[in-house]
Image (cartoon, rainbow, N blue to C red):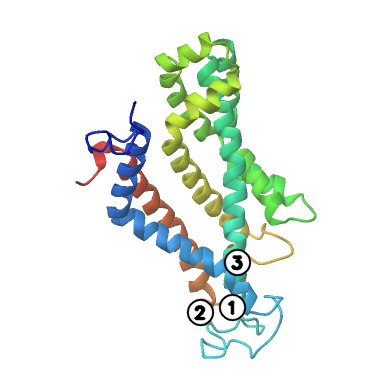
Amino acid sequence: MTDVAGAPGADGAKAPEPAAERKVSETLHFARRNPKLLIGSSIVLGLLLIGLIGPFFVGDDPNAYVGPQSEPPSGEYWLGTTSFGQDIWAQFVYGLRSTFLIGVFGGGVAFVIGTAIGFVAGYKGGIVDEILNMITNVVLVLPAMVVLIVAVAYLDARGVFIQGMFIGLTSWPWAARAVRSQTLSLATRDFVDLARLSGRRTWRIITTEVAPNMSSYLVMTFILLFGSAILIAAGLDFIGLGPTNGVSLGLMLESAVAWSALQLEMWWWFIPPGLGITTLVGSLYILNVGLDEVFNPKLREL
């Protein structure tokens, strides 16, 4: 009788682990030992928890006038108040939540569009590849920020999801090119040829044969799109094209600059949102570098 993988055989020896389980175990081993991955993920998760839990411990409206004007940080107001008596801590936690939402939604839209186009172009090749590659290049050379400014400026009501949709629709080309190049190399492998000969449909081959073999690359692509969406949204917010109803870290910076917080030496108004954006995007970059070192055997530290 053949021994079950990983179970003791007739002679008491343990059967070898399957290749997939061994690969996962090896990846987890290096992930636990990678300081960049641990530091980056810890900071991102910490900020995420603040954004998720923090709003439950502050007032319902972060823009409400609740305290004395221009109050520095204290036991009652942890990050002080604005020139209008608004609680900056309340704005910060709500702003973090909006920042994560815009990152996930904007980056997610760009990821879905970019990977779909990249997979189809790389797998199909020929005229399909040429047409999709032409569309990608056209969108790639468009000045994305100018397009976003014009599009968002003409909207009467702007929200996080509308902003994320526009960011996603202009941020996908580089992801499509990257995924296409990886798919081109996988499309000629033996296991893909075998799947073709078996008569399986294109979308099943892509989702079951091609995509799983570049899952680590896709994860890192999404993280980069996530961080990029946050920076683009912060730029739009800073020039006054952020959500019309709500609060975000970028809008906090825009308000601080508009009401001369720097000249008035109200550092507690502009440093928290600026530091929040910088820390989050920087941690995402560190996390991405750590993942690259974990997934790439050539970069692993033994």
- Structural crowding at the residue carrying mark 3, measured as other residues with C-alpha within 10 Å and reported as few (<14), some (14–19) or many (≥20): many
Observer-nearest residue: 296 or 166? 296
The residue labelled by disc 2 is: 268
Q: CA distance from mark 2 to mark 1?
A: 8 Å
Q: Secondary structure at mark 3?
A: helix
Nearer the observer, disc 3 or disc 2? 3
Q: Earlier in the sequence, mark 3 or mark 1?
A: 1
- Asked if residue 164 lies left or right of residue 42, the reply is right
Residue 177 in picture, x, y percent from top left: 49, 28
- Asked if residue 153 lies left or right of residue 178, the reply is right
Residue found 71% across the figure and 45% down from its top:
151
The residue labelled by disc 3 is: 95
- Structural crowding at the residue carrying mark 1, measured as other residues with C-alpha within 10 Å and reported as few (<14), some (14–19) or many (≥20): many
Residue 287 in picture, x, y percent from top left: 39, 52
Residue 143 in sight in this render: no
The residue labelled by disc 1 is: 88
Identify the amino acid type marked 2.
Answer: Trp
